[in-house]
Amino acid sequence: MNQLDALKQFTTVVADTGDFKQLDAFKPQDATTNPSLILKAVQKADYAPLVKDTVNQYRGRAMDEIVDRLLVRFGCEILSIIPGRVSTEVDARLSFDTAATVARGERLIELYQAQGIHSDRVLIKVASTWEGIQAAEQLERKGIHTNLTLLFAFCQAVACGQAKVQLISPFVGRIYDWYKKNAGAAWVEADNAELNDPGVKSVAQIYNYYKKFGIATEVMGASFRNVGQITALAGCDLLTISPDLLAQMAASNTPVTQHLKADAAKAADIEHVSYDEAGFRLALNNDAMATEKLAEGIRAFCVDAVKLEQLLLAA
């Protein structure tokens, strides 16, 4: 049994890509996309006809609508290959606008439904700002399921649990990147690998908290830099993995051990916490890593959203 199949015994494997032509090889249950991944995919020659067709079909409409229709087109292609769900992201420029995020999430679902896709097969991806979490809570009450992304801090995970969102995507690799950069020459890779990796420890803390207190929100570790980070989280509800790392795991026969277990979490001594808006903002502010990585992530997705629009204007 290869490493990828071994992981699938403990965890639902999700492919982190907008390149749906790669999906068949790895047989993931679900797939996730984001503005950067879609931008990367649409620049490949394979996808030029799909982009051109979408732009021609809706030329003259508002650019935000054309973008959403392109995202849904990719999502539908992905759903024709995988058995589960696809995550489609709301424009990152709306990360601090609750009402606009709700409206965009509703439109994305309407576009999917117009293509015959049931809303249960789509997760609307929203940044884990306070405004984003409130928007997700409203969408969930309307029966629209959400995936809260750019999640770096424990307080973000707690607030998402309170909002009863469907799924969260804590970012392992970007947490690791921050701590490694911050430590500089003092960083010792061996001391911060696998179970000691700061990103892995963050996800494990969230997983254990959710299981301890019966929080139904699914935990999906994301943003991996190496296979060791992935296998250290075996047992997590889901893990979303890039095609490169999926290929590495498929080519390896190294055994996989389950590290995260719901029963162990339920028996753990963990304190229950809750956040109102002021408490959330203070806790996030007091976490320098999370504050920096959240802002950086939103900025990067905003830049890629603009690049995608420029590419569509030129199509």
Image (cartoon, rainbow, N blue to C red):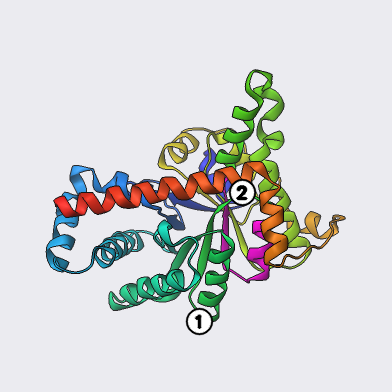
Q: Return the x and y of residue 10 as percentages of the image width and height.
A: 62, 52
Any magenta on residue 158?
yes
Q: Which residue is mark 1?
A: 142
Please name the amino acid that badge 2 sits on.
Phe
Residue in front for this viewpoint, 315 or 28: 315
Q: Residue at x 47, y 37 (%)?
A: 245
Q: In the image, 187: left or right of 304?
A: right
Q: List x then y, in percent, for residue 310.
A: 22, 50
Whether the residues at callouts 1 and 2 have beta carbons within 8 Å, the answer is no
Question: What count of labels does the image hold?
Answer: 2
The three-letter code of the residue at mark 1 reads: Lys
Asked where in the image residue 54 lies, by quadrant, the reply is bottom left
Q: Is residue 61 left or right of residue 97?
A: left
Q: Using the rendered view, name the quadrant where residue 169 is placed.
A: bottom right
Q: Secondary structure at mark 1?
A: loop
Mark 1 and mark 2: span between their CA atoms? 27 Å
The boundaries of the magenta stretch are 154-171
Tag 2 residue: 152
Where residue 197 sits, quadrant-wise, is top right
Residue 118 image position (x, y, % from top left): 39, 76
Query: Is 252 in the magenta?
Result: no
Name the foreground residue: 49 vs 134. Answer: 134
